[in-house]
Amino acid sequence: MNIEEIRSLFPVTKEAIYLNSASQSPLNILVYNRLQNCLKTELQLLGKKSFNRDNIRVPLSKLLGGSADEYALTTSTGVGIGIVAQGLKFKKGDNIIIPENEHWNTTYPWLHLEKEGVEIRFAKVNKDESFEPSAIKKLIDKNTKVVAMAAVRYNSGFRPNLTAIAKIAHENDALFIVDAAQAAGMIPIDVDKDEIDVLSGCGFKWLLGLHGTGFLYVSKRVIKIINPVLPGMYAAERMHDQLSFYKDSRKFETGTIAYPLFDAWSAGLELLLKIGVENIYKKAIENTDVIIEGLKNKGYQIISPIKRIEDRSAIIHFKSDSLETTKMLYQKLITKNVLVTLQGENIRVSPNFFTSKREIKLFLNLI
């Protein structure tokens, strides 16, 4: 598919310059049509469900690695991490390591365990929100049970070295648990190669789905040590007098989901597979190369780490010389239908594979 064919699938490109995929993906025609068809089926054939859960599990395994039966369907990133946090057994004196300033999805479920005597250790990060694997190594010990972090940090776009950190975690018999909300569908992830034990993500950002859709990957290596906490009707064999959980990740599914939303999401996953995540990441670097150069030339302060390409993603944070002027710039962009996010003191720009060179040029001209 060429860029014009791709852009034709995203109606927002006719109305605005959309640089906000880190907030949510704009609705595309394929997902919209799949949703309409699903609702039409429900309307005309009452009681007949057209959705097959493997229509999500299989493409997720192709995009992210692992096998389809290692994926459970959830409603959000935080729900998936929460299921695992509550399903693990901890004792007083155990500790969990998290980098500073992680998204709430990667902090709240673990902080909730402090009441049980679990210590939360925060690894130091740099001003640009980056950190080295050594920051984790400094804190880890024989009582560390979990190392948790995002594959891409929401507040800077930084990509930690997952493979190196997984090695540190596993050498100390700790689980490596990753938040994929800002990574899945935008950067290459391989749960097998990166030795990720648990990966939780959402559909509505880079995976081209809708709010209320998500997934939880649990490796076969660790599935036996994580207990289901809210077993639903799809988590076990259908028996009325005993509970026999499935042996795979289905045991973590909590019950009925919004079938039309997941059915629609499958169309977005199919598009990602057709384009290829490697191509999407290549386009992300090309787009952000131009944005970074433009921001430098105009004297803006770039918050995101940009020195090493392996640290970068499609997310760039920058700011002006004061919070007031940054806010004014944000309002100017929104008024001109250039959609970005004001996050704290920074403006967050997150182009996607449907973003054109012309749009980036127009954005840079406006600032």
Image (spheres, rainbow, N blue to C red):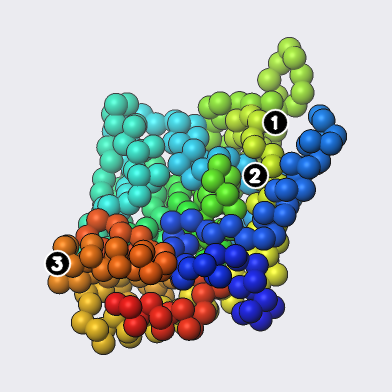
Q: Which mark is residue 102?
A: none
Residue 255 visible at all: yes
- Label 2 sits on residue: 261
Residue 173 visible at all: no
Q: Looking at the picture, how far across and down is residue 54, in whole percent?
A: 74, 47
Q: Earlier in the sequence, mark 3 or mark 2?
A: 2
Give the residue at x 22% y 77%: 300
- Label 3 sits on residue: 322
Q: Earlier in the sequence, mark 3 or mark 1?
A: 1
Q: Quadrant of residue 38?
A: top right
Question: Which of these two is toward me, 60 or 224?
Answer: 60
Q: Horizontally, is 260 left or right of 319 in the view?
A: right
Q: Looking at the picture, how far across and down is residue 196, in whole percent?
A: 51, 55
Q: Looking at the picture, how far across and down is residue 157, in whole percent?
A: 37, 65
Distance between the alpha carbons at the discs numbered 3 and 1 = 52 Å
Q: Say what secondary structure mark 1 lies in.
A: loop
Q: Quadrant of residue 51?
A: top right
Give the residue at x 40% y 44%: 105
- Identify which amino acid the numbered label 3 is placed on: Ser
- Label 1 sits on residue: 234
- Identify which amino acid the numbered label 1 is placed on: Tyr
Distance between the alpha carbons at the discs numbered 2 and 1 = 18 Å
- Identify which amino acid the numbered label 2 is placed on: Leu
Give the residue at x 70% y 31%: 234
